[in-house]
Image: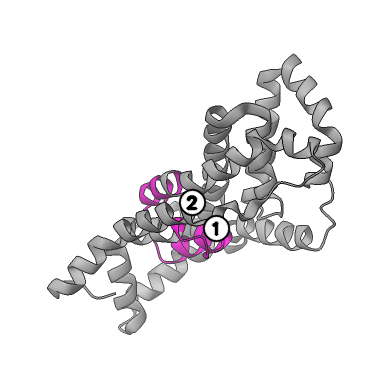
Amino acid sequence: MTQPAPDERRPAWRRHLPLAVIVVVAIVGAFTPSDWLSFETLRENRQALLDFRDAHYLWMAVIFVAIYIAIVAFSLPGASVTSVTGGFLFGLVTGSVLNVASATVGATAIFLAARAGLGETLAARIDASEGRMRQIKQRLNENEVSVLFLIRLVPVVPFFVANLLPALVGVKFRNFVLTTALGIIPGTVVYTWIGVGVGEVFDRGGTPDLSLLWEPQVIGPVLGLAALAALPILVRAVRGRKEI
């Protein structure tokens, strides 16, 4: 007699609990004032943060990464401010590495939570069906890397959506992690770069301008990368071998 898989033996509530916790915390966070994580807070506490960083660099890095992971994992507001803070505290190179690593780990947490609960059930039902949804899922799975890169590179796709949807259609874990880590690099570097000069902005009495991401010299290369990511899909479609 075939034994059920470990995931099938677990009670349903245990499989859905991680995603349920994330959703509840995200909802609470969305309706909770987030003044503690803003540019104004950074302005008021920048010297204290710099002093702590200089005295306890490793601890500052650990605390920063933990906060960033929690913000992304629970889809809390403030990810952009946190990315800028990473550049402010650690510089362009180290700040970018910490920002990318933290965002990737947080995104992976959402992905795993969704896949353990709704994702596995939904993907199995789609595979067992005979409708259009099954065909779409099959085409998506055949072009996973290209599609996931597109989702990450095109700024109009909300980060939470880009973390959740792949889990619900059963994409491979390694493809999700790889495309997340690489796909968020361009935008993350821009935000980190803003953070490097945020001290001078504060000295002038200004506020960091996050609209820089939409400047032609920035968004142009990003869209170019998105076009390259879409190229394999287009080639397959033209050849008539694949259909999205």
Quarter of the image holding residue 113? bottom right
Residue 26: percent from the left, percent from the top?
71, 59
Mark seen at residue 214: 1
Is-magenta flag for residue 179? yes
Q: Residue at x 73, y 57 (%)?
A: 25
Residue 65 showing in the rendered view? no
* Helix, strand or loop at mark 1: helix
Residue type beneath disc 1: Trp
Residue 141 vertical position relative to residue 225 in the rendered view, above or below: below
Viewer-nearest residue: 148 or 105: 148
Residue 101: percent from the left, percent from the top?
53, 37
| Pointer 2 local density, CA inside 10 Å: few below 14, some 14–19, many at least 20 | some
Residue pointed to by mark 2: 218
From the viewer's perspective, tell me whether residue 31 is left or right of residue 57: right
Viewer-nearest residue: 125 or 50: 50
Mark seen at residue 60: none
From the viewer's perspective, tell me whether residue 191 is left or right of residue 153: right
In which quadrant of the rendered image does the N terminus lie? bottom left
Viewer-nearest residue: 224 or 121: 224
Per the rendered image, the range of residues in magenta is 152-181
| Pointer 1 local density, CA inside 10 Å: few below 14, some 14–19, many at least 20 | few
Is-magenta flag for residue 215? no
Q: Residue at x 82, y 38 (%)?
A: 43
